[in-house]
Amino acid sequence: MIATACAIALVAISAAMLLCLYRALVGPDMPTRILALDTLTINAIGLVVLAGVYWGTELYFEVALLFAMVGFLTTVAYCKYILRGNVME
Amino acid sequence: MPDFGDIAVASLICLGAFFLFVGSLGLAKLPDLMRRLHGPTKATTLGIGAMLIASMLYFLMKGDEFSIQELLITTFLFLTAPVTALMVAKAHLLLDKSERKNLPPTGRDVDWSVYDAPRKTQQSENVQSEGN
């Protein structure tokens, strides 16, 4: 039963990632692309947690935590670059 | 005959995947950035939250010890999601010139903080001199 739910969730998250990719490629301005990349990272975290449940290992939580940290840092760095023209001042 | 825990984990996984999909659908479908910001917040809080509760329940059911990492990921995401939304909105306000006309006047001699550098006003000088 959990395996079936994982299969359904895999399809849904893959479709969500394709939608984010579409917005990142088409998106008319830069903040939209940044937002799309951030949402792509969120979906990747969901996928990693799903893989951890499917294969029954707790090894993947560190990966999810790293994804969360790096995704947040890259988003803030991109926005900072737009706002100030520089990342580190 | 599946037991109650399996049903709970499976339904939480489906709920999380549904909200992740809805968040990305909102991102792809809504017309402008201020409205597009709504979608991914649902994906972050409800989607990832339900997935992490599902995995916490699953590993608790498997008989392993209670792991703290899910709570760490949840806390980190809940703390960083508003900061991300604020930064994206500020970048949008700076780049889009038409948004500036829609803002109400500040009522002071300084403009909104995205557009105007902080300036030393008479009041803050008085406060500073009183402090000295």
Image: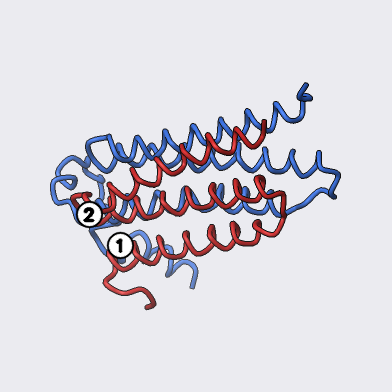
| Label 1 environment density (alpha carbons within 10 Å; few <14, some 14–19, many ≥20) | few
Q: Quadrant of residue B48?
A: top right
Placement of the N terminus of chain B among the 4 image quadrants: top right
Q: Colour of chain B?
A: blue
Chain of the residue on which disc 1 is drawn:
B
Instruction: Please tell me which residue lies in front, A75 or A22.
Output: A22
Residue visible at 76% across and 29% down in the picture: B5
- Against A37, residue B34 (above or below) is above
Is residue B47 left or right of A25 when viewed as pictured?
right
Side of B60 where A86 appears, left or right: left
Residue under the point 38% across and 62% down: B124
Q: Secondary structure at mark 1?
A: loop
Please tell me which residue lies in front, B67 or B106.
Answer: B67
Which residue, as the protein is rendered here, is positioned at the far bottom? A89
Picture quarter containing residue B31? Answer: top left
Q: Earlier in the sequence, mark 2 or mark 1?
A: 2
Instruction: Decide which of B99, A43 is in the foreground and name it.
Output: A43
Give yes or no for contact between labels 2 and 1 (Cβ–Cβ under 8 Å). Answer: yes
User: For the residue marked with disc 2, what is the amino acid?
Assistant: Asp
On the picture, is A51 further left or further right than B2? left
Task: Report the coloring of the rendering.
Answer: by chain
Q: In the rendered image, what is the letter of the chain coloured red?
A: A
Which percent across, then down, holds residue B123?
Answer: 35, 59
Residue ID at (14%, 44%): B101
Q: Quadrant of residue B57?
A: top right
Which mark identifies residue B121? 1
Pinpoint residue B49: horizontal percent, then vertical percent.
59, 40
Q: Which residue matches tag 2?
A: B109
Residue A56 appears left or right of B117: right
User: Which residue shows up at 79% across the image and 25% down it?
Assistant: B3
